[in-house]
Amino acid sequence: MAEGSSAAGPVRVVALGGLGEIGLNFLVVEHAGAAIVIDCGVMFPERPAFGAGLFSPDLTWLGTGKLKFLGTVLTHAHEDHIGALPQLIKRFPMPVYGTPLTLTFARRRLRENEIAGSTDLRFFLPGEVIELGPFRVEAIRVTHSTPDSLALAIGTPAGTIVHSGDFKIDEAPVDGARFDADRFGRLGDEGVALLLSDSTNVERPGRSGSESSLRPVLREKIRNCKGKFFVSAFSSHIHRIRQVVDVSRESMRMVVPLGRRAIESVRFGIEHGQLDYPPGTFIDPAEAEFLAPRQLTFFTGGSQAEPNSALGRIAADVHPRVRVDAGDTVVLSSRAIPGNERPINQLINDLFRRGADVLHDAVAPVHVSGHACRDELTDMIRLVRPRTFVPIHGEYRHLVRHAALAIEAGVPPANVFVLEDGDSLLLDQAGARRGAVVKAGRVAIDGDEFADPALVDERRALAHGGAVVAIVAISAASGRIVGGPELISRGLTVGDGTSSLMRQARSELAARLAQIDPPVGPGDSRLRGNIVRALRDFFDDTTGHRPLVVAHVMEVE
Amino acid sequence: MAEGSSAAGPVRVVALGGLGEIGLNFLVVEHAGAAIVIDCGVMFPERPAFGAGLFSPDLTWLGTGKLKFLGTVLTHAHEDHIGALPQLIKRFPMPVYGTPLTLTFARRRLRENEIAGSTDLRFFLPGEVIELGPFRVEAIRVTHSTPDSLALAIGTPAGTIVHSGDFKIDEAPVDGARFDADRFGRLGDEGVALLLSDSTNVERPGRSGSESSLRPVLREKIRNCKGKFFVSAFSSHIHRIRQVVDVSRESMRMVVPLGRRAIESVRFGIEHGQLDYPPGTFIDPAEAEFLAPRQLTFFTGGSQAEPNSALGRIAADVHPRVRVDAGDTVVLSSRAIPGNERPINQLINDLFRRGADVLHDAVAPVHVSGHACRDELTDMIRLVRPRTFVPIHGEYRHLVRHAALAIEAGVPPANVFVLEDGDSLLLDQAGARRGAVVKAGRVAIDGDEFADPALVDERRALAHGGAVVAIVAISAASGRIVGGPELISRGLTVGDGTSSLMRQARSELAARLAQIDPPVGPGDSRLRGNIVRALRDFFDDTTGHRPLVVAHVMEVE
């Protein structure tokens, strides 16, 4: 059993991301000031906008909680679980645990932020146990859409906490590494205080199906393809790459990984023994130019229509080496992340314009989810038989539905807690109760810096209403206005009449300024305030728009 | 048969919107300079952004084509078919034909643009024929998700053109007004030169199912609901409103239409005999306050999570009169328009947070599409047996798949044309061929004005990179620089160091300006060009961002 005494108070589970909002998976388990972190992901905004390319969890609370951080445990290699590791580790250095493949992906992230060398990465394999202060963390193998994914069993002074990670129950995994149902069952026998379980697919009935069920589909599609065969999937989906390679080899095709991420994933897969093929299986685009279309399969990322992805450039016919032609088949082997539907539709339309046939999950069974559906979720609850249940990894509605499912599966309603980001749960031998709410949320990041929320607001205001800059020059000697007001606008009004509107605004402003007693200085807030108010009122009255108004007072010789 | 001689040249069908891009349905049929317009819709942008709330078709070509416009025929009341009527009619006055209900919705649009009184609206009922110059236009009843929808058969000197409108083949329509399969069959017997047919659901196998199949589902949900019952659907879906009212009356509930559009639709439905209920069936929210939750059904728009809709305000708990509580049921009886998924998910999450149970098409069969699926599309082609086929109303991929379906259904491949916006087809007795491409596209509108595309670009640039304004004051007397350069930035950089960056930019700019020989004047383009180039280079080098740079030279006394 774990060290530590429950006399030191309860064990606290703090949800800092990933609850009520997809992405940003980030959880802290704490006892008597000693804490471990489980996952630390990034979230992609609906569309890159206002300069914020990514969201990281808000780390403020970690710095104010007087906590000692003993380690971060990563469940698997997906960006929504590892992406904000650089932000975390830079501010709170601690060892990071994960499977070798997970750590390889994590190291890539850390390298981009130039802290790979200084981070203490430690292998943590299924069946292994690490002791972290009062916590005894065990890695349990689960199946998911990236290899070597883990669930965690965490022995604590308040009993065992099971964290499912992202999982499905795949009966025939591509690499033969099966979901460890036995271990979950034995944990259930021993008694589990709390189960935290993946809610993504709670709205889908039945079972998700095995990843390997895709192989005959891919085989049929590749056999029917007379030209080049393209498959686009999440680049970290190494099992899918493996199946693409297998059916390509059967059809005497070479595989060309396209795009930086896809190439890295293939390299990582080879390094970790997941893509064990003879030399010559993978070729680069330059070599592909010597081969006939029928001899080629391309594997690319970009299935979410990310701008500047290899597939996007091919669809737009601006890729330097690869083009899509009539007779080619493009398989989008993924499901749209909500918010990406329109760009994905545009991508499909563009590929059709090039003459390709495009297969996506709306028209053919070319994708299998990596998350457990309802029957598998019920299996997990019945194996573990937790005293307390908390749904994780889903939007709020998924959490509510997963909570209802847990009650159906036998967890007493009073022991089921729907937590949102910032909520916490206190566990002791007697049971569980809600703890204090802590600061949590998401912040935009740019490189390894946090973006200034005020800046993002400013850009949003500019985007919606444009800007007006009013300039007045005053004499350093006399304090009198010697130039202006002059107005500059950008992105301000629509339709005709812009210039007459600006003339009118200028003359109203000039009349207002004439009433102000000189002298004024450049730091005179009364003058600037008057300008801003006058222009805001004017544009609101005349156009109904609210541009960002900037008053600039300039001192001249 | 229609008037006019084919000696005057071919009949031209010009696709100006709605092909390759959902929305903006807008087609011109022309012969010897005489033209009719079929539909003129608006399109909603992914998210209201950059000040452009709506897109209208580009009308430029209509003004350059030396065409005489004889009339616009509206197939049905949806915004993507009637929304840009004000823009069209203001510039090209002509009579507008449609069913009474369609014209009622169209008049609402025209009234908003203050041209309702001056527009010549004429009833056009199923079975009726209007003669418009060389064209003989017949209205044919079809079934769709708004009542009184039409297909058109257009007699022309080059043979009959059938335009399907938006349709499904509903065997049990709510109002008993059935799809006129007989008439399509007889047109097929007489010979059809061209069929233009709705492609929306070509990716869905089978049949769409009858709208009336929803009634038992709604009945079951309302019976199980212990609290208030909310249904949200497109407000113009009067058949759906009718079914909601029917099951509400069975459960002894009053119906409260909520939101301006929903209230108008109920009023229009009553006026046109589609909602024929005793007084007291519909009540307003003030009256609802005197009734128990179990006695109330609310019908609202906002199922696409439109900002400021009644449902959105209820979900955010900021509606002045209505709230959602635990025990209430909210049915989202619609399908997400691509691009709206994230806001709709957010809406559902917010409703769950209020304690409601939310039913949407992912978890319950609470929506039936108004568009024909594959088997119905095949039925249409087999009824009409056209010589030539053009798929309309769909994204490019839908058009391609519908073209393939037409070939399967027996149309010779050489006679199937996938047109995009701006493409045209020339028809004569000998057959069809592609004509010249004309200017087409979409333009943002603001009120009844077209938005300036340059403005939209400017706002996009501001949103992505922010803006820097550089100001230099020069003496009117000497032409010497007497103030500045001073820099103002908004939305420019993220992270720390903004102010030191701006200081550095200013000093580099000052150094560059010191090399320019005085004197200069305020209109001096060399000075402004130097400033813009210097700052663009500076920010690109230091931040990698490309702000909008404005140079302003100010003359002072």
Image (spheres, coloured by chain):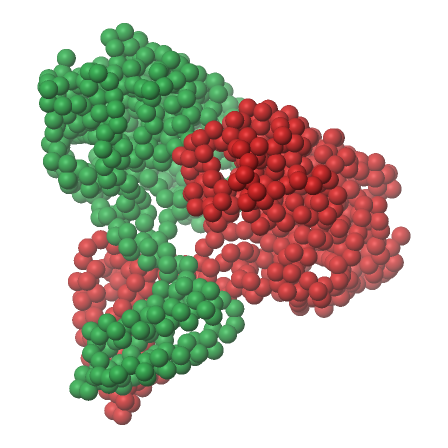
Chain colours: A red, B green
- Quarter assignment of residue A346: top left
The residue sitting at 52% across, 68% down in the picture is B495
Residue A408 locus on image (x, y percent): 70, 32
Q: How many marks do you count on the picture?
A: 0
Between A135 and B108, the one lying in front of the other is A135
| Residue A1 higher or lower than B277, as above or below | below
Direction from residue A24 to residue B205 in the image, left or right: left
Direction from residue A413 to residue A343 in the image, left or right: left
Quadrant that contains the C terminus of chain B: bottom left
The residue sitting at 42% across, 16% down in the picture is B408
| Residue B243 higher or lower than A79, as above or below | above
Task: Pick out the residue farthest to the right.
Answer: A1
Residue B244 locus on image (x, y percent): 43, 26
The answer to whether residue B264 is visible is: no
Between A395 and B201, the one lying in front of the other is B201
The residue sitting at 25% across, 21% down in the picture is B432
Direction from residue A375 to residue B422 in the image, left or right: left
Between B347 and A308, the one lying in front of the other is A308
| Residue B296 higher or lower than A462, as above or below | above
Residue A461 locus on image (x, y percent): 38, 60
- Quarter assignment of residue A543: bottom left
Task: Pick out the residue farthest to the front.
Answer: A290
The answer to whether residue A133 is visible is: yes
The residue sitting at 31% across, 13% down in the picture is B384
Direction from residue B62 to residue B144 in the image, left or right: right
Quadrant that contains the N terminus of chain B: top left
